[in-house]
Image (cartoon, rainbow, N blue to C red):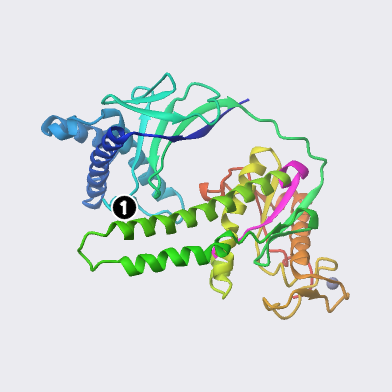
Amino acid sequence: MIETVRYTYRLRPGRTAKAALLAEWGRCRWLWNEAVHQHRTRRKPTLCKLSKLLTEARGRNAWLRAGSQVAQQQTLRTYTAALGASFTVKGQGRPKVKKLKKALPSLEYTTRGFRIKGGVLCLPGKVTVPVVWSRDLPSAPTSVRVYRDNLDHWYASFVVKRDTIVPAAADGSAIGIDWGVKVTAATTDTAFDLPHLGHRRRCAAERAKAQRKMARRCRPKGAAPSKGYLRAKRQAARVEKKAARRNTHEARVWAKQIVDNHTLIAVEDFKPMFLAKSRMARKAADAAIGACKRELIYQGVRAGRQVVLVPPAYTTMTCSECGTRAKLRLGLGIRVFDCAACGYTADRDVNAARTILATAERVRASADDVRHAIASCRDGGSDAVRAGNPPDSSMGKR
Ligand SMILES: [Zn+2]
């Protein structure tokens, strides 16, 4: 089996290459904004129409002709893809104007537009960029995206084909996962719990220091920012990014461990808004629950595991032993679940995880209830199964 993946490498562009890339980005950004304008004035831009307009514009303007046609064509292609997705993917807005000061540079090239020669990435206009080859490319890349992040670091993301990595054999066990704020993920087997990462909170003081520095060095509106201000801004961004990367890395390691050891993975279908409304919003955001969930579903589906998404309603209130639902909602401060009907006592999160697993197993047992939802790209997979009914519908008293 062959799979198509992205391999990303750090780039080390020199001063000339950086200037050339930014100039290229300026032209592509203009094209993107033109395409947005076409849509806003109800001219229904399709790739075909936009390509025609591009040809005309290149004929008229020498500055546009100076840029790479491949990059410009790809910008329009990306735009039409984004526009198409905005009609089909729930919650995705129409593509917006890319502002000079806000939008980060991103350029795409197909095989027609780039070459790798002697370990150096060669782009149109005699632009050569050294690549940090942190690992070998598994095959010749079919396209590349060259982009810059907010720390002024450049990357190249190559689309390559490789043999599907066969996951380790699982022993047929099942696991239920409940998202929380005390521990990021509470599971039915405490050995697999993901403790609260909280990297952002740990470095909050450092970031606050940089932000105070920014405030002190901030000039009135309209004046060009000072060097000290920009330095402090970069420092704040660097601290933030470092924490975010540690969160992502640890979530990946955890997800791999879960996927390697289980065949049925029952996940609470966590909606960030569910917690954001409470006082715990900040903690929830720090725990990066959304990213953990996405990573788990992605890895689980790719490894061919059965991933079941269970609606979060009533999971904390329902007894995992007898299925009775408590009359009152459990406050966030109460850590222990106590069943009034059968006297079962457990940690609040463990009980929720057990309820989630029980629901998923019931769904699996009765095939009629299984509904294959075509999960949107937000959920990170296409084969994740959603549990049809909330956990209380068939058990317990109303
Ligand atoms: Zn009970």
User: Does 259 lie within the magenta span?
Assistant: yes
- Along the line of sight, the residue nearer the viewer: 125 or 145: 125
Q: Amino acid at mark 1?
A: Lys
Q: Quadrant of ligand 1?
A: bottom right
Q: Residue at x 80, y 72 (%)?
A: 324
Residue 178, given in percent of the width and then of the height, sits at: 70, 61
Say above or below: 366 vs 121: below
Say if disc 1 is inside 8 Å of ligand 1: no
Is 82 situated left or right of 193 in this image? left
Q: Position of residue 382 (x, y in %)?
A: 58, 43
Residue 136 appears left or right of 36: right
Q: Is 332 or 307 nearer to us in this picture?
A: 332
- Residue 348 location, x and y as percent? 75, 70
Whether residue 77 is visible, yes or no, is yes
- Please tell me which residue lies in front, 274 or 286: 286
Residue that carries the numbered disc 1 in the rendered image = 96
Neighbor class of circle 1 (other Cα within 10 Å; few <14, some 14-19, many 20+) is some
Range covered by the magenta-colored residues: 258-272
Most foreground residue, 345 or 389: 345
Q: Does residue 116 show up magenta in the picture?
A: no
Count every numbered label the image shows and give the total: 1
Identify whether 256 is placed above or below 287.
above
